[in-house]
Image (tube, rainbow, N blue to C red):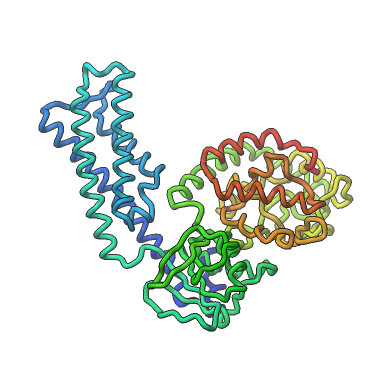
Amino acid sequence: MRFLMMLSDISQMGALPDPWRKIRTHRLRVRLYLLMMLMDQFCLMLGFGIAEVVRRQGFAGPLGIDIIFLAAPLYLTLCLMSSGYSRSTLESIEYSVSRSLIAIGVTGAVIMASVFLLGASRDLSRLNVSISILLSAALLFLARAYFTRAVRSRYPSTESVLVIIDSPAATHMPSPHHDVLDVNASGLQANVNDPMKMHEIGLVLANYDRVIVHCEPERRSDWALILKGGNVIGEIAQPGLRELGALGIGYFAGAQTLVIAKGPLSLPDRLQKRIFDLAFTLPALFALLPLLILVALAIKIDSPGSILFRQKRVGRGNRLFDIYKFRSMREELNDHSGNRSASRDDDRVTRVGRLIRRTSIDELPQLFNVLLGDMSLVGPRPHALGSLAGNQLFWEVDRQYWRRHALKPGITGLAQVRGFRGATHEMSDLQKRLAADLEYVSDWTLLRDLRILFLTVKVVLHKNAY
């Protein structure tokens, strides 16, 4: 429903001819990934089957399970973890084959090591296993090469592309394989000092995997910041400025481009992070349900007003969303814009509010934001539009602020476990958090998320929590 509302907003702008392009390309890629998975599993089954027929011996492992039923899921897991099912495997034969061969090689090594460690070498011939792995590898090599070549020849593009024209001198030939957005016609000028404009651009970018911008030199820096925080593969045409932080040179429609941003997480990475979020959030909500009910009753009894407090925050791709918290201030004094940070002796905070803020219990409803997909358990903390560092808005302190929104915001994050939380009285308070957020965005791993989640327990009670 929220996505349909987003599409309605876009159609009202009258800018995009095909807002469903990303949905179709995503569905296409998912179908191709599933087909590739089935093809890989068939190659493994066929490789082990041929080896059994040739050697005339079954491959029952130490637990009485045929080795193929251990090799197949292990290979699939290794492929998923090593981007063996990603956009690159649909575009590059070399990349696709290398990912597959590495996965089958590690699979064979793990099986051989398990046979040795479990003392099952008498019951299971290592030669038989080696032949099966080699046959499977050969079949995977041929199948992957043919599959990727077939995809490249049948589908002109497996990604949704938007070309943004923000220069009167720019010329671009239309194509049925990508969309074109005229900035002047749509009114979506790059203005990093206007959160609502960033929100509108974020809604548009959400429909694409790759965005190419043609703009005047003086606007390249603004577009670079927008693309870096837009959770897209971002490129600026006619490169020439080092300060943009280019990642490399790209090509599109015969023209050279400057690669400014790459979506930080591939589809397998996003899937891992989402599964991780749900694996913790669902049990946590079930376990915390009695506490949530008690806190809700206490808030209702303590002061008149709503139980939950909703506020617009900046999320992934610089798009706005409603964050949920337990109301900790008097209803009539709630600060929905976020201009005034809570102080130690803030007269707006209720009696119950002071307790739940001190223990961070007021943040627990954000677990519902995680379920809705607006937030993640771990990520840069989302800020209100009116948040100030000293006397300046956050994005006025450092223009790199918009880059932190390349990932979903989190209930906790690297900055929080390092002790950077509470009010931002000085510009340096924001700069420390921003440095930690950008470090997290540029170097995300699932293991780091797990580590941050456990370290959060140590900072739930913090001197800056009030």
Determine the image quadrant of residue 118. top left
- Residue 214 percent across, percent down from the top left: 51, 74
Which residue: 47% across, 76% down?
A: 180
Q: Against 5, is 357 above or below?
A: above
Q: Quadrant of the C terminus?
A: top right
Position of residue 23 in the picture relative to residue 95 (left or right):
right
In this view, 279 is above or below 4: above
Query: Is residue 37 rendered to the left or right of residue 257?
Result: left
The answer to which quarter of the image holds residue 192 is bottom right
What residue appears at the point 75 percent right and 55 percent down from the top-left corner?
306
The residue that appears at 22% across and 39% down in the rendered structure is 136
Q: Seen in the image, is 390 located left or right of residue 52? A: right
> Measured from the top left, where is residue 430 in percent x and y?
73, 52
User: Residue 183 at x, y = what percent?
Assistant: 56, 78
Nearer the observer, 16 or 90? 90
Decide if residue 345 is on the left or right side of residue 454: right
Residue drawn at 55 percent across, 53 percent down:
373
Residue 55: quarter of image = top left
